[in-house]
Amino acid sequence: MCIDMAKKNVTVTDVCMRDCLGRFDKVRPDLEISVAEGAMLRPLAESGLEMVDCYRTDAGNFCRDGDYVTAFAAINYAHAWIGCFRDLGLFRMTDYRELFLELDSSDSDVSAVITDERMAKYLDITTRARKKVVIAPPVRSFDRKLALDFLERSDSFFRTAVGYRNDGDYLRAFAAVNYSHAWLDGAARMGLFDVDGDDVLFTLYE
């Protein structure tokens, strides 16, 4: 697919990054683990929070290095982890909306381009991760329903990413594909998916 560069929304600007980081940092202090101390799921919730903060740190570091594209991927990934654990009931947060739905692609003197190659690479990585996934819980179990719900959420974000990409909106497509992968990643960490111990495409619990 070849789209005229002049018609594409392909740039991650410093304004866009400040906006995404600002929105994230505004909601992060309100994020709480909803599982009681000592409960069996508490360590899983804590590990999810650790991943959220780890990817936020990565986003800041990439920003300081001037790599806005990878920083943009990281902050959307961090935010998607919040949504994933929130929807499972492990996090408590009242105000949550995907960052790419709020994006303001304002003009800026400092920007980085999401190339066709980078867009294709991230879609391919998530596609490979999706193919690796095997539903782990047994048929007719509650956890299987959860796993299927997570898979559908990931697939929905992926379809959204492809739709934006086809419309030439690489900025939102790039964000959405990171949400898609994060939902696969979160489910693998929770044990809803068997990914054959792949710790390259996934960030496993141990």
Image (spheres, rainbow, N blue to C red):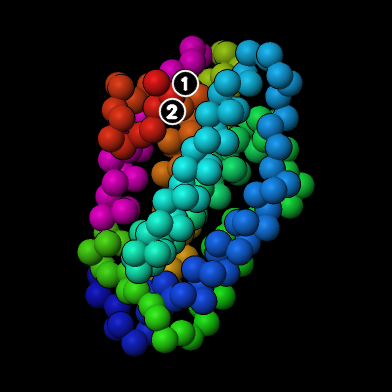
Q: Quick check: is 136 in the magenta stretch?
A: yes
Helix, strand or loop for disc 1: loop
Give the Cα separation between the discs numbered 2 and 1.
Answer: 5 Å
Disc 2 + disc 1, Cβ < 8 Å: yes
Q: Where is residue 87 in the image (x, y as percent from the top left)?
A: 65, 37
Residue drawn where x is 42% and y is 51% of the image: 58
Q: Quick check: is 142 in the magenta stretch?
A: no
Residue bounds of the magenta highlight: 121-139
Q: Quadrant of residue 101?
A: bottom right
Which quarter of the figure is the N terminus placed in? bottom left
Which quarter of the figure is the C terminus placed in? top left
Q: Quadrant of residue 43?
A: top right
Q: Can residue 128 be seen in this view?
A: yes
- Give, as a three-letter code, the residue at label 2: Ala
Q: Mark 2 points at which residue?
A: 188
Q: Name the residue under label 1.
A: 191
How many numbered marks appear?
2
Q: What type of secondary structure mainly makes up the magenta span? A: helix
Helix, strand or loop for disc 2: helix
Residue drawn where x is 32% and y is 53% of the image: 123
Q: Where is residue 2 in the image (x, y as percent from the top left)?
A: 25, 75
Q: Position of residue 201 (x, y in %)?
A: 31, 37
